Image (tube, rainbow, N blue to C red):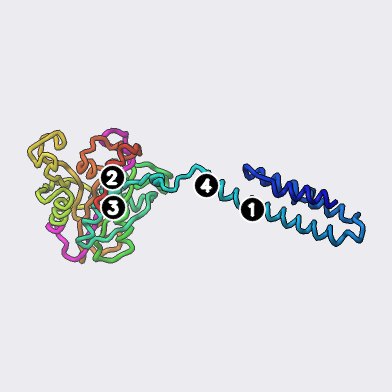
Amino acid sequence: MLQKIETLSAAIAAFTAQSSSDVEQFRLAYLSKKGELNNLFAEFKNVPNEQKKEIGARINILKQEAQAKFDELTAAFSSAENQTLDIDLSLPGNPLQLGSRHPLSIIKKQIIDIFSRIGFTVAEGQEIEDDWHVFSALNFPEEHPARDMQDTFFIEKNPDILLRTHTSSVQVRVMEKTQPPIRAVFPGRVFRNEAISARAHCIFHQVEGLYIDKDVSFADLKQTLLFFAKEMFGADTQIRLRPSYFPFTEPSAEMDISCSLCGGKGCGVCKHSGWVEILGCGMVDPNVLTNCGIDSKVYSGFAFGMGVERIAMLKYQIKDIRLFFENDLRFIKQFQAAN
Ligand code: PHE
């Protein structure tokens, strides 16, 4: 038996491993349940009593030798294998693909920032609306052809549930909840059942503005929009208001700005007129105030609404509105937010 122990001891001492699987082989051969050491302990029962002390001590030493060898091999291989992994810690990391703001998001923020500088807060409403908030409260009579100005996606009929065709619905919601003074802009997505082309889309974005207080006049409207136009398109920008019609404003107007591309001289963008239309506006019709629970004898106000895509197309000289929705990274990566 002693002879066998010495042979095993020599084998353990001489054992070398090339990989961690060799280390596992070692463990199985010597330290596992069916390994050599357990075999020795089993045989130990048959050792004559007078030799038990000596052989027992020698087996225990052998066990320590095997355990020490195993620990040494394990330590060597866990660090050795880490080092041989194909990692160069001095290399720069994989660059993270940084996203960029969508051009519509950049322009929307610029619009909101400009109005917030003159005291406008921001409110958002819901995209799925009822007839009251999109049409009836805004003075669109039942069956009136003005409803056809905005082709509507209906979700349910009678009572009508629909996708809002303009953010003027948020005007109504805010006026129903708040007494004047009200000074807010309403950014949001709107939907119209229109054929998609380079100039029109069935989904687009608007920012609407509303100012209701005592003695608000058309002059306030004009000055507010002039401020906006100059901030957005540059200090030289001029504005021009043309009479128009909206059921919820009286009088109503459409606002043009002097063409930011040719400075008013005439070019392809302004169709050689020197002017480009950017928004609709007007004094809030007293009927709308009454519908929303505001006393139209005490208060007056103005509203305006613009398409974010339209502003972005002018600012960035984008010729096709569909580009905003295609999410082609080559397109949307080109725009840098100033802040
Ligand atoms: N809601 C109108 C539209 O979508 C724009 C508008 C808003 C006009 C407010 C006047 C006042 O066309």
Residue in the image at 78% along x and 59% along y: 60
Q: If you read the primary sequence from the N terminus, does the residue marked by circle 3 or circle 4 appear first?
A: 4
Q: Which of 129 and 240 is in front in this view?
A: 240
Mark 3 and mark 4 residues within 8 Å of each other at the beta carbon: no
Q: Viewer-nearest of labels 3 and 4?
A: 4
Mark 3 and mark 1 residues within 8 Å of each other at the beta carbon: no
Q: If you read the primary sequence from the N terminus, does the residue marked by circle 4 or circle 1 appear first?
A: 1
Report x, y in % for residue 318. Answer: 23, 38
Name the amino acid, label 2. Pro
Name the amino acid, label 4. Gln
Name the amino acid, label 3. Leu
Q: In this view, does 74 lie to the left or right of 122?
A: right
Q: If you read the primary sequence from the N terminus, does the residue marked by circle 4 or circle 2 appear first?
A: 4
Q: Is mark 3 on a helix, strand or loop?
A: helix
Q: If you read the primary sequence from the N terminus, does the residue marked by circle 3 or circle 2 appear first?
A: 2
Magenta residues, start to end: 192-220
Q: Viewer-nearest of labels 3 and 1?
A: 1
Q: What element carries label 4?
A: helix
Mark 1 crowdedness (10 Å alpha carbons): few <14, some 14-19, many ≥20? few
Indicate yes or no whether the magenta region holds residue 193. Answer: yes
Report x, y in % for residue 235. Answer: 11, 51
**Which residue carries the number 2 mark?**
103
Indicate yes or no whether the magenta region holds residue 207. Answer: yes
Q: Viewer-nearest of labels 4 and 1?
A: 1
Q: What element carries label 1?
A: helix
**Which residue carries the number 4 mark?**
83
Mark 2 crowdedness (10 Å alpha carbons): few <14, some 14-19, many ≥20? many
How far apart are labels 3 and 1 at the CA level? 84 Å
Residue in the image at 24% along x and 44% along y: 312
**Which residue carries the number 1 mark?**
72
Q: Which mark is residue 2?
A: none
Examine the rendered structure and indicate whether residue 118 appears above or below residue 96. below
